Amino acid sequence: MADLMMPLHDLFQWVSELPTSIAIRESQYVSPYLTVSHVLSMCFFAGLIVMMDLRLLGIGNMRTPFSDVQRRLFPWQMLGMGTSGVTGLVLTYSDPMRFYVNIFFWTKMLVMVLAGINALAFHFITYNSVVKWDSADTTPFGARLSGALSIVMWAIVIVSGRLIPYNWFQN
Amino acid sequence: MLEPYFQWLGKLPISQAIGSSIWIFPLVQAIHLVFLALLAGAILIVDMRLLGFGLTTRPVSQVARDARPWLIAGILGMISTGIPQLMQNSMREYYSEYFWTKMTLIAVGLVIMLTVRRKVTQATESSLAGKIVALVSIGVWGGVVWNARLIGLFT
């Protein structure tokens, strides 16, 4: 594991010494306002993801066919993902070694990847049969499973993201 | 004026208990954010519809009715995870201008939600008034989030 992390360690170390990284780190206002922007972007992204997940579970937004919810919200979810991604990336860029040693940061990264895999799996498997259940009162097991996994995983992402400042497990 | 009440709140045994644990406060704070996502989704899906984005294939009133239970769940979740944070940190909040801006904006947001926004979300289609209400609603709730996060960063 230590060997596997070495290239990442070197990358994070290298970034932390870049002049722009140091400049943002030493500025008093950039990172607080980036953090606030990251939270606002998160509201937009996670909020619309949850609305779709509730539809997948068959318990929310049931007056709209699923394919409508998916297609109509998708561009906005992507916009939210873009702004969350950019603000998050700049935050990481500005203080990489702080995040490198943080267990919550890596938990967040890992669960984000898993949530992405869940979304793709749903898209390529369950979504193929959407015409059969688009306006039905209940959704199939695969849809409910994807919706539940998505809510749980994005909740873990939010919680572990918020816990990053509390580095209880750090020496 | 309210200072004695905040002092009293901070001295309650339950407030002291929350403060004596290193993980209760951070965890409550993190769950507050999860409910924030739910609340933001339930507000945005309706405000976006009023502005002519998102679920435009359905009437405004239907989108709003679908969102309501999650809106209420989001508000209840925010209150129940917000109060313990206020109890444990009462004096920091009392002296934070961001806290009072946040509370003022929440009051404004709730009044809008229960009056004009309620009215415009009963219609099938959105009018100019509906669009204005939606923009104000997004702005006010965005302001709540903005000030809320700054309590911890600048106090």
Image (cartoon, rainbow, N blue to C red):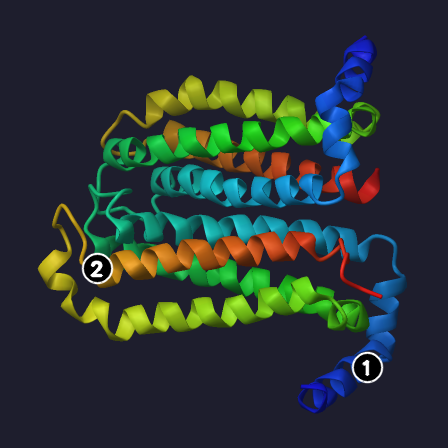
Viewer-proximal residue, B72 or B103? B72
Q: Which residue is denoted by mark 2 in the rendering?
A: A141
Q: Is residue B22 left or right of residue A72?
A: right
On the image, the x and y values in percent for residue A64 come to 21, 46
Viewer-proximal residue, B89 or A78? B89
Q: Earlier in the sequence, mark 2 or mark 1?
A: 1
Crowding near the residue tagged with mark 1, few <14, some 14–19, many ≥20 C-alpha atoms within 10 Å: some
Question: Is the residue B17 above or below the residue A143 in the image?
Answer: above
Residue at (50% x, 72% y) in the render: A113
SS type, badge 1: helix
Three-letter code, disc 2: Phe
Q: Quadrant of the N terminus of chain A?
A: bottom right
Quarter residue B114 falls in:
top left
Residue at (84% x, 37% y) in the render: B155
Crowding near the residue tagged with mark 2, few <14, some 14–19, many ≥20 C-alpha atoms within 10 Å: few
SS type, badge 2: helix
Residue at (22% x, 54% y) in the render: A66
Q: Is residue B146 left or right of residue A100?
A: left
Three-letter code, disc 1: Gln
Query: CB of mark 2 within 8 Å of CB of mark 1?
Result: no
Question: Is the residue B93 above or below the residue A39 in the image?
Answer: above
Viewer-proximal residue, A51 or B46? A51
On the image, the x and y values in percent for residue B29 come to 65, 41
Q: Is residue B37 left or right of residue B59?
A: right
Q: Provide the chain ID for the residue under circle 2.
A: A
